[in-house]
Image: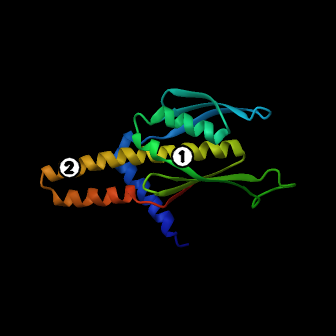
Amino acid sequence: MVESVEKTKRKETYKIMKRTLGDDYVTFSINEGHILEDVANKKTNLCIKFSENGGEQCTIERSGFGVVNVLFDALIDQYEKTYTSLSDITLKKFSVTPDFSKIKGNGSDAKVVVEMMFSNTSNQITTFSEKCDSLFSSMLKTIFKAFEFYINREKSFNRLNFFIEDSKKRNRGDLIQKYTYDLTCVIKHDIIIKW
């Protein structure tokens, strides 16, 4: 089977970010999530427990207007001081689709695919999707994957720029070319991330 161009680009981008950051590559693990919808007052209360790189558990407790709004705003507040590019991302599209391909019985066991499209101030579009048994889990995992990507992208951008400047000081054209190529791969647009 031939791999799509998008899938090949995606693999290369992740490979470069992981190679560039090594142990500094950020991963999120969602441990627990609770949602309480106050339908009458149109308010969502959310409690998420997660860890970053397997470290200490963080808890987000927040209220707002829907799971996506609450979690997106909470993660921006939590991380944008350290990763300033996060303030530039906006959600452009959000879709939910049931996957009936492997149902048994009446179809209520269908998986749920959540897809979210984000853009930044340069109008670079990045799409993330997640398929789970639950709509809530799919939403959480999709948003966390997006933040994981944008955080690692900023960290890789900064580190690769440092490597390029260091290579210039050492008059290493070969490394300048390598790191410039890596930087181009990391910052390119129209990346589709499916899990």
* Relative horizontal placement of residue 188, taking residue 136 as reference (left or right): left
Residue at (29%, 50%) from the top-left corner? Answer: 160
- Sequence order check: which comes first, mark 1 or mark 2? 1
Element on which disc 1 rests: helix
Determine which residue is flagged by label 1: 145
Distance of label 1 from label 2 (alpha carbons): 30 Å
Q: Amino acid at mark 2?
A: Glu
Q: Quadrant of residue 69?
A: top right
Query: Residue 163's mark?
Result: none
Q: Is residue 54 visible?
A: no
The residue nearer to you, when weighing 144 against 12, is 144
Q: Position of residue 193 (x, y in %)?
A: 53, 56
Q: Is residue 120 above or below residue 63?
A: below
Q: Nearer the viewer, residue 182 or 36?
A: 36
Q: Residue at x 57, y 27 (%)?
A: 59
- Front residue (pair 188, 40): 40
Q: Secondary structure at mark 2?
A: helix
Side of 131 where 54 appears, left or right:
left
Mark 1: which amino acid? Lys
**Residue 132 on image: x %, y %:** 68, 48
Give how far across and how far down residue 118 sits, in percent. 53, 52
- Identity of the residue drawn at 50% across and 58% down: 125
Contact between marks 1 and 2 (CB within 8 A): the answer is no
Position of residue 43 measured from the top left corner of the image (x, y, whole percent):
71, 33
Q: What is the quadrant of the N terminus in the image?
A: bottom right
